[in-house]
Image: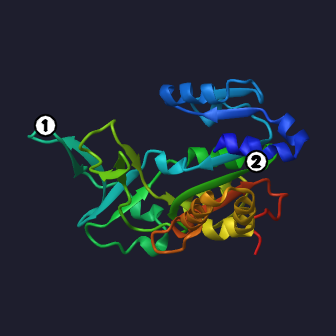
Amino acid sequence: MMVDVLRAAKVVPDFRAAIDLHLIEISPALEHLQRQAFGGGNPPVSWHRSIDDVPDRALIVLANEFFDALPVHQAVMCADGWHERVIKIGEDDKLHFSIDRDPIPLFDKLLPRRLRAAKIGEIFEWRADNIALEIGRRVARRGGAALIIDYGHTESAIGDTLQAVGGHQFAEPLLTPGLVDLTAHVDFEALARAAEGMGARVHGPVPQGEFLRELGVEERAAALKAAAPPEYADAIDAALVRLTSEDRTGMGRLFKAIAVADPRLERLPGFEP
């Protein structure tokens, strides 16, 4: 994606020349591939393990399917309150989900009021909000904006969304640890609340399909088709549908876009009513 962003940035030469690119990557293997892709030194590129290591100055953040890959915690509602969901090794020497013996003190007081009447067996998920807090702090104090695109729910909700994907197929999360990708839906309400708490202005979230149409994705697809060989027309149409479909499981509906920005930025493209 970043290669495409840099290519598109060439239409504003001064902006393209001013880019100082910082990538957050914890995988040595993926960092190696990225170094090959950005080996030309233009723009200058730095790699970091955490946003805390990125220089503290004005910034533009692009986070596409980033938050869904961050660790997620789960709590299960039981007769005596909420217990954290844990992983244990069973008698068969395999990993199994279980629940911690003791309830989490006062956990229900931390939940949105509308979720406090959860039924026994229901699950609530949450993530540490340190990254959302840091993004909010930086754009509020130093200027800039963050565009976050991910799949998830606009409001905090009850439900187990943890899933594993391996070889483009759904898999059991605990069956082959380390060999499959683990993800869970992003709670955009919690993310926005954390960023706003640091003084940032939040725009959205809006469904990805709506966001892309506001930015002119349909006109862009038509222009690509006009300039491309006829045999690519169907592929362009299919890509447009895949990104904007608002069917129940379509990317245009399931994925959301949200912006965290300098509070002086009152309107942002794609988020205007």
> Which mark lies nearer to you, 2 or 1?
1
Marks 2,1: beta carbons within 8 A = no
Closer to us: 67 or 141: 67
Question: Which residue does the image show at 36% across and 49% down from the upper left?
Answer: 165
Q: Earlier in the sequence, mark 2 or mark 1?
A: 1
Residue 224, how many percent across, how many down? Answer: 72, 59
**Mark 2 closeness class: few <14, some 14–19, many ≥20 residues within 10 Å:** many
* Residue 253 disc label: none
Residue 93, image x, y percentages: 13, 37
| Apparent side of residue 24 relative to residue 84 in the rendered image (left or right) | right
SS at mark 2 in the image: helix
Name the residue located 35 percent from the left edge and 45 percent from the top edge: 167
**Vertical relation: 156 (above or below) 167:** below
> How is the model colour-coded?
rainbow
Extreme residue in the front direction: 230
Report the Cα–Cα distance between label 2 and label 1: 47 Å
Q: Is residue 79 visible?
A: yes
Residue situated in front as seen by the camera: 14 or 203: 14
How far from the left and from the top, in percent, is residue 21?
Answer: 73, 33
At label 1, which amino acid type do we have?
Asp
Q: Residues within 10 Å of mark 1 (few under 14, many from 20)?
A: few
**Residue for badge 2:** 139
Q: Which residue is mark 1?
A: 93
Check the image and report above or below for 146 versus 156.
Answer: above
